[in-house]
Image (cartoon, rainbow, N blue to C red):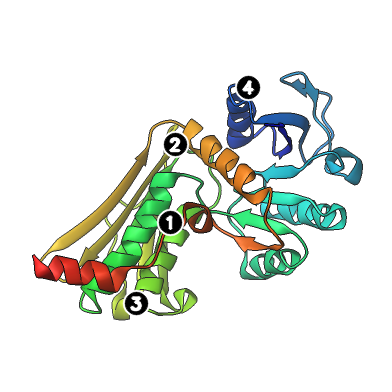
Amino acid sequence: MKKINLAITGGLGRMGQQIINSSKKDRNFKIISITENKILNKKISGFKLQINSKNVFKNAQVIIDFSTPKCTLEILKIASLLKKKVVIGTTGFSKKEENLIKKYSRKIPILKAGNMSLGVNLLMYLTEISSKSLGKNYLSKVFEAHHKYKKDHPSGTALMLGQGIATGKNKNFNKLIGKKYLNKVFFPYGKSGKINFNSKRQGDIIGEHEVIFSNGKERIALNHYAFDRALFSEGAFAAARWIINKRPGLYSMRDLLNFKWTISKNLRLLLKY
């Protein structure tokens, strides 16, 4: 199999460095360029860091982006001109920026995920099923923890899980967003069905997420703990392999994993037993 040429953005970031290190063990890919948003006289894994440009991306087949929202939009502008495929792992986008990403996806294939982990995307699927199954009598909230250097909160994954809760209830997620706490030991459920979020920033935590449902009589929790950042780079590589033959559009890890919405069938089976 011919290797896929990759351009990696955000090369000095934690995920950028993880992807570069993981690529050395994966024979499916060849890194041809690594970028940062500032001109730096520095090399990483033998590559000179460059700024985003047409020339830097012209020979890439897929761009894997773990940078910042502003940088991502700059990358997408260039990628759309060159007709390059993009995998986005960056988080913290505003609603306006999300709409711009959708606009670019009309021209090029984009796979965007708040989290590249198989386990997290399965957790989101289970969150949707739980939210629909439990109904409106159960309140919900989301907790997440990351390393002290992570700037955005709630994390992109926490917001994904919140979207899963809203999808299960067939509600507009933006209308269900409640309060956003930071480093609270305890935090309440949102009122009137709102979803509250609590974020912890401490040490070198790779990623912890928990979705909690309660009706006052019982408490159901769905958890995911990441122990090795390599699982995210493996997910990014899976996304790059998958998107290589896709047409323009905005895709997610759910499209890659091909989870089917089978809630009615699942409920019937559960009720049978």
Q: Quadrant of residue 268?
A: bottom left
Q: Secondary structure at mark 4?
A: loop
Q: CA distance from mark 4 to mark 1?
A: 30 Å
Q: Which mark is first along the chain, 1 or 3?
A: 1
Q: Which mark is residue 206?
A: 2
Q: Position of residue 211 (x, y in %)?
A: 31, 58
Query: Which type of secondary structure does the marked residue at label 1 adopt?
Result: helix
Label 2 or label 3, whichever comes before in sequence order: 3
Q: In the image, is residue 188 above or below residue 132?
A: above
Q: Nearer the viewer, mark 4 or mark 3?
A: 4
Q: Are marks 4 and 3 in contact (CB under 8 Å)?
A: no
Q: Quadrant of the C terminus?
A: bottom left
Kindly identify the amino acid type of the residue bearing the numbered disc 4. Lys
Between tags 3 and 1, which lies in front? 3
User: Which residue bears the numbered disc 1?
Assistant: 158
Say which residue appears at 15% left-offset and 66% top-offset: 270
What residue type is disc 3 on? Lys
In contact (CB < 8 Å): disc 4 and disc 1:
no
Indicate which disc, 4 or 2, sits on the residue closer to the N terminus.
Answer: 4
Q: Amino acid at mark 1?
A: Ala
Instruction: Tell me which numbered mark, 4 or 1, is placed earlier along the sequence.
Output: 4
